[in-house]
Image (cartoon, grey):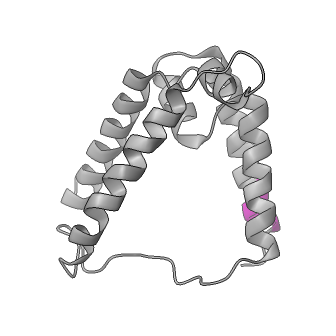
């Protein structure tokens, strides 16, 4: 296995373990966070806050390297404006997240802990990805 593929696999596994340890593979926890006027669960706020704080502190140091450790160049988006496609995609993502309590990362990690919700969500997510690929003009 190539070092880049091995690093990607290790990073994904670490991310999945972190999601499982923080309880983010439980869709009810995410839905509890979104239920502001009901049975509110602030746990997701702390998980997101930790991720944002880590990124804010370390991202500038990583980019100062000039290139990734196992690659030739960083692959950063060059998009500089908000358009209808971005807004529509964000809205669909948010509505799906609010309905199911899952986004792609926790859903895949949920498969690892045999979450029943993830067993339903992941095939639907894959169907949506396939539909996008078939209908996309890019």
In-image side of 114 versus 125 (left or right): left
> Which residue is located at x 82 percent, y 66 percent?
135
Relative vertical location of residue 29 with respect to residue 6 in this rendering, above or below: above
Specify the quadrant of the image occupied by residue 119.
Answer: top right
User: Residue 118: image x %, image y %?
Assistant: 62, 25
Magenta: main secondary structure equals: helix
User: Along the line of sight, which residue is nearer the eye, 14 or 101?
Assistant: 101
User: Along the line of sight, which residue is nearer the eye, 81 or 110?
Assistant: 81
User: Along the line of sight, which residue is nearer the eye, 10 or 85?
Assistant: 85
> Which residue is located at x 30 percent, y 46 percent?
11
User: Residue 41: image x %, image y %?
Assistant: 60, 21
Relative vertical location of residue 2 with respect to residue 84 in this rendering, above or below: above
> Which residue is located at x 57 percent, y 16 percent?
115
User: Residue 15: image x %, image y %?
Assistant: 37, 39
Which residue extends farthest front?
37
Instruction: Find out whether residue 133 is within the magenta segment.
Output: yes
Instruction: Find out whether residue 16 is within the magenta segment.
Output: no
Instruction: Please state the total of marks drawn on the protein image.
Output: 0
- Region rendered in magenta: 131-135
> Which residue is located at x 35 percent, y 60 percent?
56
User: Residue 43: image x %, image y %?
Assistant: 51, 26
Specify the quadrant of the image occupied by residue 73.
Answer: bottom left
Quadrant location of the C terminus in the rendered image: bottom right
């Amino acid at each position: 296995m190539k070092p880049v593929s091995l690093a990607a696999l290790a990073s994904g596994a670490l991310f999945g373990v972190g999601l499982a340890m923080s309880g983010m593979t439980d869709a009810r926890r995410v839905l509890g966070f979104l239920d502001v006027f009901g049975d509110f669960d602030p746990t997701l706020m702390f998980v997101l806050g930790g991720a944002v704080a880590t990124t804010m502190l370390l991202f500038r140091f990583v980019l100062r390297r000039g290139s990734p450790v196992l690659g030739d160049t960083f692959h950063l988006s060059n998009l500089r404006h908000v358009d209808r496609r971005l807004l529509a995609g964000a809205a669909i993502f948010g509505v799906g997240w609010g309905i199911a309590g899952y986004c792609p990362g926790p859903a895949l990690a949920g498969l690892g802990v045999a979450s029943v919700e993830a067993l339903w969500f992941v095939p639907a997510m894959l169907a949506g990805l396939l539909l996008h690929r078939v209908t996309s003009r890019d």
